[in-house]
Amino acid sequence: MRISVGFLLLILLLSSCEPKHDLPITINLDDHWEFKSTSDSIWHKATIPGTVHTNLLENKLIEHPFIGDNEHDLQWISETDWEYKSSFNISEDMLQKKHIELNFEGLDTYASIFLNDSLILKTDNAFRNYKIEVKPLLQLENELHIIFERTSIHEEQKQSALPYQLPEGNRIFTRKAQFQYGWDWGPKLNTAGIWKPITLKAWNDYKIKAIDVQQDQLNESIASLTLRLEEDISRNEKLNYDVYVNDSLYSKNLGYPEIPITIEQPKLWWPHNLGEPYLYDIKVVVKDGQKILDSISTKKGLRTVELVTDNDRIGQSFYFKVNNAPVYIKGANYIPQHSLQDQVLKTHYDQLLNDVVAANMNMLRVWGGGIYENEEFYELCDEKGILVWQDFMFACAIYPGDEDFLKNVSIEAQQQVKRLRNHACIALFCGNNESSEGWHRWGWQDGFNDFERDEIWNNYMKVFDSILPQTVEKFSQTDYWESSPKYGRGNSKYKTEGDAHDWWVWHDGYPFEHFEANVPRFMSEFGFQSFPSYEAIRYISQKDSLDISSEGFKNHQKHVRGFQLIKDYMARDFPVPENTEDYVYVSQLLQAYGISKGIEAHRRAKPYNMGTLYWQLNDCWPAVSWSSIDYFGNWKALHYHAKKAFKNTITSSEINDNILSTYIINDNRKGFEDLFSIRIIDFYGNNIWSDEKTVSVSANSSSKIHELDLDTIEVNRENTVVITSIGTQTSYTFLVKPKFLKLTKAPIKQTIQKTENGFSITLQSEVLQKNVFLYTNNKGRFSDNYFDLLPNETLTIDFNTESDILDDLKIKTLNQFIQ
């Protein structure tokens, strides 16, 4: 939580006259740390927050795990016990406080903590914070010592206590990021360490532990809220609670800290594509008379978010209402931005989430095999108007159900729900990713007897049907969903009820056209791989040339059939280049082609379908993966294409039985009237056929606006493009697969001009240029890329960069690979 500069000045002003304050004192214990393996005698400098892997890297004791196949040579790290130590001093004033508490925000994972040689705490959950009173042990000079045991010791002990082996290995016993054990897009880097800050807090008779802003009533005329403070208090006197809204004093309250607030004509918080994500600053100052004891601040977006799962004539709906308005969800699945989480900075969060907004996404799903994200992530989602589907951290496994595990999970869930509940962005808490699907469809029940199956499923229900939903209901006002997907693709209901993960494409090799014929109520996962940028490939191989055949590079493809699937799909729909640079380029076109086909099919089916989240937004290391933005922040073709496909208003066409049907999709809260046009031209710009009409488009709708029987016009499908427009929005539809297009090799005229923020690039060609790819060694971002350039039309692209010279601009198009 953050306090504004103005509010801090107010606090300082009020506390400047003695004795006007008795505020808690907090210090960060992030300096003077050292680490070593428990079997070594030499200590090395450590950066905190950090992990063993990053600390080893900083001391140049290991090679970088992201380069080549170094990952394999570093597995010894997770099979080693590690220890950290630090010395710190505290002031006499702090030592005289009545209460002093050590707060460990994140220890990964099995840690024993010693303060001045006394064991004070043992931890077993990287997702929990641990607070412990330490005043009796503190001195002016102190030493903190933490020993981390390797996870395998504890996992083997817990496994030996079970009479059977649960699916998906021993990672299930440890409450830490599951992807660290290896995934089909990420490395096996099971790290340890102090991955979040450690603080020391001292106070006398009072401190605020947390604030809950409960929304009791909300409409356009009034917002009724209740502020509830969670306190640590050891005094009987009634306290004063001063409430500030947007830095203005709202009320003074005496007594119990449950404070009603009424805001007239409230500004509502909206996803950025539908309105302003307005946030109120709410602050509470607690005083004993005029003496300030503590204060707390939070930002609150006033909105309602509801998951609607009503039975209907088809099955059961699955859509979100925001402020009582149905909202079409557009976005992607989000994974941790780095395998070593301490390397993710505020600037990384800001850039990635700016890229989310730029691509017209209004939701991210925080996937359950990663982490509950840092506060900066959720604060930025609040500010930028991005909804968050928040999984609890359980993925692709069945978990144990012993008493200790359930208690651990219960505390974890309480802490995380209470931490996140005030964020406007939080739209849903979901129990797990694909655990129910795996149990019912992936053969996980094989080998168990009836008693064991019942016990395992009952343990599943204890977590996902009891502990988690009860925690969400008790501590938040957010809806809960047990498991994503509701039904797997082997169940006939996967298209008619709940959310769906459609992996017929990719895993089962189905063609991209499958997406158009199989639209679910809400698509929460679907995807396709591509190669990363040239920059990422060069980094992996540490070569100037593009090497995708070395064992080191192959290590960055974690799907066992990944390379072959890309090749098979490419041969089906695109020309297959022999040159590596060209092959990488076409792989990205392939990914963008398939996923865009799915996105548009989903949006055309609105309101039957009310959301599409592709897998995946980002990478945790440089890799061949399903991401639309690679590890270095480079937009792949998919992200550029998603930006167009996710616009609030688009035209979208499909062909069935030689009938070209065109839809206008409008996600805005208001309808409009505008000119719709459709024309067909050949690749030299000659007009073949056209039509136009004024149309009325309803709010939040998808409507078929035009039909054309292609048999009624004389058209060479391999040499034509259909151009549909509504207002300033234009879309292109080709009548055959890219590999069958009769493209022409021709030059592209280019003019480059320097601008304040980089360069302006003007392009023109006498023929249609398909999937124009601009690239340079300069770091920067093109305003558009992998686009189609119409014949005889001028197109201007901006390149935002800090570089002063752009003398190596290269252009690649699909035209070059058509025989």
Image: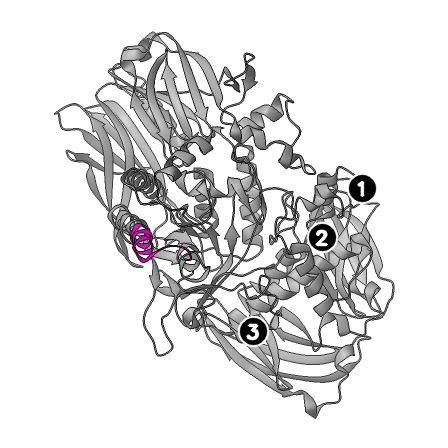
C-alpha separation, residue under disc 2 versus residue under disc 3 = 34 Å
Q: How many numbered tags mark residues here?
A: 3
742 to 484, vertically: above or below: below
Residue 756 in view in this figure: no
- Amino acid carrying label 2: it is Asp
- Nearer the observer, 739 or 719: 739
Q: Mark 1 or mark 2, which is nearer the start of the sequence?
A: 2
Disc 1 and disc 3: Cα gap in Å?
45 Å
Disc 3: which residue:
516
Q: Which amino acid does label 1 sit on?
A: Ile
Return the residue at label 1. Answer: 805
Task: Give the secondary structure at mark 1.
Answer: loop
Residue with the mark numbered 2: 798
Which residue is farthest bottom? 712
Question: Residue 159 appears at what percent x and percent y?
Answer: 39, 39
Packing grade of label 3 (10 A; few <14, some 14-19, many >=20) is: some
